[in-house]
Amino acid sequence: RTGRTNPGLYVRLVPDAVYDPLPDFDASGVERSPLTRVTLEAAHLAQLLASPPEVRAGLPVTVSEEGCGTVAFWDGPRDGWRIRLNGGAEGGRTFPESSVHTLPMQASHILALLPSPPALQRVRFALAELHELGALTPEDTPTVLGAAFLKVPLDVPLARFVV
């Protein structure tokens, strides 16, 4: 850590011609890996989070007579959930728990919670592939076969050969 967090001497053993073209940060694992397994895991997690339906931070909800939005956090002093309504104010508003209702969870909602979420087109392709492999129902919940794929430590197309 010398030179980054503490005083010291930093010696780079790579010439400038090699070092300068390198990007500042690598692409995230979600951006550079196959998305089928991660999407199947997200669909399984969405199924777990949806039963029983509970309001949780980061998940989509509908507010009585206000519309749909995303839960930000529990606002204790105001005794309600802080919700960013779709197309609403940046910081959101606080609503009592009785007026907040959960929406059906989907894998795309879970993937959108990642620090660097994948592109929506990649998610659609992964969902289509999972449907073709028989891992998801039409409602995007894992089938028995999809649950078996999750138990095998392989990518989904390879797990299809094993199961």
Image (spheres, rainbow, N blue to C red):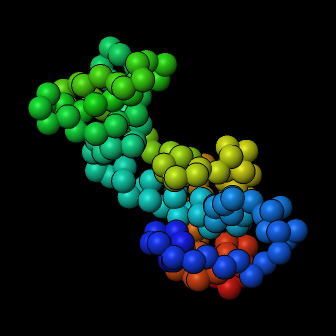
Q: Nearer the viewer, residue 60 or 8?
A: 8
Tell me: 79 left or right of 52. left
Question: Most extreme residue toward the bottom, as rendered?
Answer: 162
Question: Most extreme residue toward the top, as rendered?
Answer: 65
Q: Is residue 56 above or below residue 131?
A: above
Q: Residue at x 53, y 64 (%)?
A: 41
Q: Quadrant of residue 75?
A: top left
Q: Residue at x 32, y 14 (%)?
A: 65
**Residue 139 appears at what percent x and percent y?**
55, 47
Does residue 124 appear anywhere in the picture?
no
Tell me: 100 left or right of 70. left
Q: Nearer the viewer, residue 32 or 42?
A: 32
**Residue 157 appears at what percent x and percent y?**
73, 73
Q: Nearer the viewer, residue 15 or 110?
A: 15
Exactly how many numbered labels are in the figure?
0
Q: Quadrant of residue 48?
A: bottom left
**Residue 125 appears at what percent x and percent y?**
74, 52
Q: Residue at x 43, y 55 (%)?
A: 47
**Residue 111 appears at what percent x and percent y?**
54, 52
Name the quadrant of the C terminus: bottom right
Does residue 127 appear anywhere in the picture?
yes
Q: Residue at x 33, y 29 (%)?
A: 83
Tell me: 55 left or right of 111. left
Q: Nearer the viewer, residue 69 or 20?
A: 20
